[in-house]
Amino acid sequence: MAKTDGMNSLETTYRTLLKERPSLIRRGLMDKINRESRLIAVKGSRGVGKTTFLLDYARAYHAEDRACLYVNVNNLFIANDGLFHAVEHFHKLGGKVLLLDQVHKYPGWDRELRACYDAFPDLQIVFTASSIVRINTNPYLQGVVDMYNLSGLSFREFLELETGETFPVYSFGEIVERHEEIVEDILKKVRPLAHFGNYLQYGYYPIYLEQKSHIDYLLKNVNLTLEFDIPYISQIDLKYLVKLKQLLYMVAADATCTVNVSKLSAAIGVSRATVMNYLSYMRNARLLTLLYEEGNDDESGRKPKKMYMHNPNLLNAVCLDDTDPEVVRKSFFLSQLCPIYSMNYTEQADFLVEGRYPVTVCRGGRGGKAEAPVVRMEDMIERGRGNVVPLWLAGFVY
């Protein structure tokens, strides 16, 4: 069947991208995707590699398959034809797997995706969306979509990129129980501390491989998130954007990481309820991590106990490297574990992992053992002993 010029153009773009954007490592999420699902969502914040992930999915499972197509939904062909009609056209031409990038930027995307799901039962659609977008609770998609979150590079993945070696993933329980043995296996391939400082500066976002100035890139992404993504989803009046930016900077600059809603409210000139909403928006955008006491979350109406920048790269960029090393360490730990485990505030230590492991994150070199049952994750030590575990090893949980 002859293809239209528009469809030919889409396929040419797709094949060009496959050649020009080679896969460098296999992201851990790739092996978790249920390939039998007909509708798959991959959410992620700006810069974590969603486009590359879609292209890698095509390479991994449909490399020479002409029935597979990648499309950025911002394409003019989609705008002209409409999403449903473009998908219908692709399906009539024998299409079996459609990879849709940035689908949330298309008006009515959820309704039209559901229409596609119902109309074409032999078509698989894999789509990416902003981390801010609600997927599982969307009335059009509820019960038919499998959703996955794509995080930035873990320290493990960063080491694979930097060294060309491969490293296994370990659960946090394995790390706590077997860290001495695990570390010896890793040290046969790499000296992690030689790379750890670079990771804290720029290694979370895979775009570092292409960017000369990672700080400029991250600040640009922060601004785009605050100025376009959050207002687009949350319907914030543009005149209040400066308030969002002020709040983000105050959180980044606060070495105590405590949540004083009254103080924040007075400082930026909005109500306490608005401060709570703004914190929630920035949490959903993966600019912030909010920690609650066990049993509480943002749905409970309780305020968080602690708040941190989402990852150390963002913290360093926003604060222009004028950061508290203790906060950087804790931001790293949270960025590695939050995608996998429930994390809560506890009076007993810095964090409570999965309701089971109280963890303190601290500077290394103090000697001695951690007081059981607290796990002490120490920075700048290569090996640990007993309940003292190298902090860098937290970067191997995904």
Image: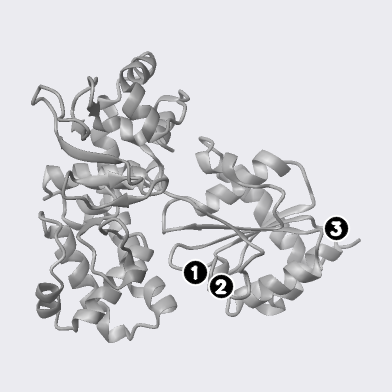
Residue neighbourhood size for the residue with mark 2, other residues' Cα within 10 Å, grouped as few (<14), some (14–19), many (≥20): few
The amino acid beneath tag 3 is: Gly
- Asked if residue 88 shows in the view, the reply is yes
Q: Name the residue under label 3.
A: 94
Q: Name the residue under label 2.
A: 138
Q: Which one is closest to the eye, mark 2 or mark 3?
A: 2
Residue neighbourhood size for the residue with mark 1, other residues' Cα within 10 Å, grouped as few (<14), some (14–19), many (≥20): few
- Asked if residue 27 shows in the view, the reply is no
- Distance CA(mark 2)–CA(mark 3): 29 Å
Residue 294 is situated, as x and y percent measured from the top left of the image, at: 29, 55
Q: Which one is closest to the eye, mark 1 or mark 3?
A: 1
Q: Name the residue under label 1.
A: 134
Of 24 and 393, the residue lying toward us: 393
Residue contact at pointers 2 and 3, CB within 8 angstroms: no
Label 2 or label 3, whichever comes before in sequence order: 3
Tally of numbered discs: 3
Of 230 and 377, the residue lying toward us: 377
**Residue 41 occupies which quadrant of the picture?**
bottom right
Q: What element carries label 1?
A: loop
The amino acid beneath tag 1 is: Arg
Residue 76 is situated, as x and y percent measured from the top left of the image, at: 63, 73
Residue contact at pointers 2 and 1, CB within 8 angstroms: yes
Residue 289 is situated, as x and y percent measured from the top left of the image, at: 29, 57
Identified at 15% across, 49% down, the residue is 321
